């Protein structure tokens, strides 16, 4: 592409984040396609450094995040490394989360249009890199979700901020079940903005490289955006809102079982297969997040919960079952929701070892996550 320039530090073909400037467009491509671009600490640092440089670069009018390969933008964080940190009792996972959450906040308040192509798999940490941006594009291949309860963890990277603000109780449903959604439901729940067929993304890249203003970006995206194929969450709001408005996880499951809708019964089965500790802590985190005004405040809360989860047996066990041994048969401890007490949940929200993340209140224009609205 004319005018292409590659930034130092991300030019090698085997770099895990490819960084370059194409016309007015600064482009960051996650480049671990065999791992569906799973995010490690070096990638977080590279993205944060690039965003800081591009913010000051007068040539750059727009930033684009995408992923190498056709499987997805990002499957989440490197959970093998997180498990290793939990087992060894070191600070590697906590240090990774600290930098990752700073990056999430940096994206949310970025002063230039930040466009994310949420094509294919976008899970966990991938949501944190994309759904806090100014322009979030999904495709017919998009699978967007926060599956943390499956591995004995709790939605982070601002996931509880996003899901706590989804229509009705749809965010609670997605958080507790860990279920992904397609393009239409990603837009419906507020995790995405526009649907563009995957085959049109290269043309959209070309248009963005010529965009000089926010209005140009909006015009370019509008030129390629279409109405997404119908989703399902909106039509299921009756049972979702009725069941998930209960005060406790146990009552939510009871309401799901008693409702009569086949989808409700399936959701109950799904929740009861997840880590009971993670499910009850996730519910508490979502309810608390609703009362927090800014993304930064929610990220601080998530950091306390994330570091607490390193001491749960369920985190290491869940990753073992899903990723290491792949037997899909975790042995949760405690094994059922009723055995997780209120005090167990409350401990997850105590101050984190080493202090808070240290996120400053946002200053100046840009982003939307910090202000509590989009």
Image (cartoon, rainbow, N blue to C red):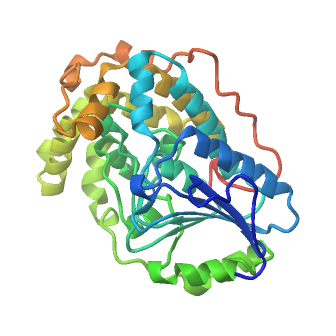
Up-down relation of residue 264 to residue 305 (above or below): below
Residue at point 35%, 60% (across, down): 181
In this rendering, does residue 333 appear at all?
A: yes
Q: Position of residue 89 (x, y in %)?
A: 45, 15
**Quarter of the C terminus within the rendering:** bottom right
**Quarter of the N terminus within the rendering:** bottom right
Q: How many marks?
A: 0
In this rendering, does residue 371 appear at all?
A: no
Up-down relation of residue 243 to residue 80 (above or below): below
Q: Position of residue 291 (x, y in %)?
A: 55, 35
Q: Position of residue 199 (x, y in %)?
A: 46, 82
Query: In this image, 5 relative to 146: left or right?
Result: right
Q: Nearer the viewer, residue 330 or 280?
A: 330
Up-down relation of residue 211 to residue 246 (above or below): below
Query: In this image, 78 relative to 277: left or right?
Result: right
Residue at point 36%, 65% (across, down): 182
Residue at point 59%, 27% (across, down): 95
Q: Nearer the viewer, residue 18 or 187?
A: 18
Query: In this image, 235 relative to 145: left or right?
Result: left
Up-down relation of residue 152 to residue 183 (above or below): above
Q: Position of residue 32 (x, y in %)?
A: 48, 54
- The answer to which quarter of the image holds residue 345 is top left
Q: Nearer the viewer, residue 1 or 364?
A: 1
């Amino acid at each position: 592409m004319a005018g292409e320039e590659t930034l130092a530090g991300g030019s090698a073909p085997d770099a895990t984040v490819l960084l370059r400037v194409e016309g007015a467009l600064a482009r960051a491509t996650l480049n671990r396609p065999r791992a569906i671009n799973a995010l490690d600490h070096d990638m977080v640092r590279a993205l944060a450094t690039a965003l800081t440089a591009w913010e000051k670069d007068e040539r750059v009018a727009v930033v684009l995040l995408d992923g190498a390969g056709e499987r997805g933008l990002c499957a989440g964080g490197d959970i093998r490394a997180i498990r290793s940190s939990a087992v060894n009792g070191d600070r590697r996972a906590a240090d990774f989360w600290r930098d990752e959450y700073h990056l999430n906040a940096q994206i949310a308040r970025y002063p230039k249009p930040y466009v994310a192509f949420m094509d294919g798999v976008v899970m966990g940490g991938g949501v944190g890199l994309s759904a806090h941006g100014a322009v979030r594009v999904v495709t017919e291949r998009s699978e967007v979700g926060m599956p943390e309860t499956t591995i004995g963890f709790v939605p982070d990277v601002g996931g509880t901020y996003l899901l706590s603000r989804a229509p009705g109780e749809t965010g609670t449903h997605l958080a507790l079940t860990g279920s992904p959604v397609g393009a239409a439901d990603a837009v419906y729940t507020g995790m995405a903005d526009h649907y563009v067929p995957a085959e049109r993304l290269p043309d959209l890249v070309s248009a963005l490289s010529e965009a000089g203003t926010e209005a140009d970006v909006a015009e370019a995206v509008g030129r390629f955006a279409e109405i997404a194929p119908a989703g399902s969450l909106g039509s299921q709001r009756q049972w979702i809102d009725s069941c998930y408005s209960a005060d406790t996880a146990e009552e939510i499951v009871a309401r799901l079982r008693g409702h009569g809708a086949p989808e409700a019964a399936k959701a109950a089965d799904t929740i009861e297969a997840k880590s009971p500790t993670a499910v009850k802590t996730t519910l508490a985190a979502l309810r608390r997040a609703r009362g927090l005004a800014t993304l930064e405040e929610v990220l601080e809360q998530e950091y306390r919960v994330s570091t607490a989860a390193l001491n749960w047996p369920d985190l290491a066990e869940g990753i073992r079952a899903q990723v290491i041994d792949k037997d899909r048969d975790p042995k949760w401890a405690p094994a059922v929701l009723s055995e997780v007490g209120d005090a167990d949940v409350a401990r997850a929200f105590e101050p984190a070892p080493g202090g808070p993340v240290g996120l400053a209140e946002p200053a100046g224009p840009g982003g939307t996550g910090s202000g509590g609205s989009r």
